[in-house]
Amino acid sequence: MSDFGMSGDELEQMYQQVIMEAARDPHGKERFARDLTKEEGASGGEAIVRAGHEYCTPGESHQFNPTCGDEATVHVEVSDSEPHTIERLVWDGQGCSISQASLSIMVDLVDGKTVDEAMDLAGAFRKLMESRGAGLDDETLEDSLEDAVVFQGVSKYPMRIKCALLGWEGMKDAVAKALAAKA
């Protein structure tokens, strides 16, 4: 990975700032999932109405990390026409800045891509998380991750890798459900 002429500490600080910014202003976050922490009563509930794309099949996946309590529900709408494209990708959830930032950056990377491109990006991100801080050897693969490369530092900490992967696993599962519903 390019170090932009910065020291390791300066680069790490820049990456941490990107993660914090993405967590503070998350892209693709919408309130649509049931709040599982509150008991639902017979009255006083609220309804959340969503409009979908007419020529898309939706899929949704709820992911939970029992280690730290992060959770996310990922909703995806996949086009019915070939090649299948992710026409809409939104999420709802709560957790640490790493999980929330990863979800936000994932939306920026994957929304509008074909399913194959999205799965390739998910695979590249997983490889980055498995690098234990070393990054990727393939510069083209690394470049495809754009802002997601900031999670290279996170990959040094095994307990945080699950936080970063939470949304990506949800996206893959939601896409699989949408594609299965087409069959």
Image (cartoon, rainbow, N blue to C red):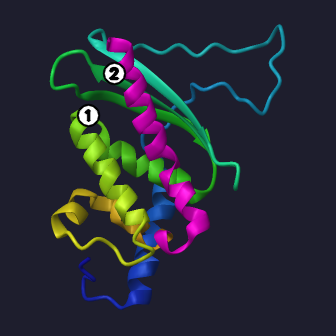
Amino acid type for the residue under numbered disc 1: Val
Amino acid type for the residue under numbered disc 2: Leu
Residue interval drawn in magenta: 155-183
Secondary structure, mark 2, is: helix
**Residue bearing the label numbered 1:** 115
The N terminus - image quarter: bottom left
Q: Quadrant of residue 140?
A: bottom left
Q: Position of residue 154 (x, y in %)?
A: 49, 69
Number of marks present in the image shown: 2
Q: Residue at x 70, y 29 (%)?
A: 35
Counting other residues with Cα less than 10 Å from the Cα at mark 1, is it few (<14), some (14-19), or many (20 or more)? many
Do the CB atoms of the residues marked 1 and 2 lie less than 8 Å apart?
yes
**Residue bearing the label numbered 2:** 179
Q: Quadrant of residue 9?
A: bottom left
Asked if the stretch drawn in magenta spans residue 39, the answer is no
Q: Residue at x 39, y 71 (%)?
A: 131
Q: Residue at x 57, y 29 (%)?
A: 31
Q: Is residue 18 above or below residue 71?
A: below
Secondary structure, mark 1, is: helix
Q: Residue at x 52, y 48 (%)?
A: 166
Sequence-earlier tag: 1 or 2: 1
Q: Position of residue 72 (x, y in %)?
A: 57, 39
Q: Position of residue 92 (x, y in %)?
A: 55, 35
- Of the pair 12 and 67, the residue shown nearer to us: 67
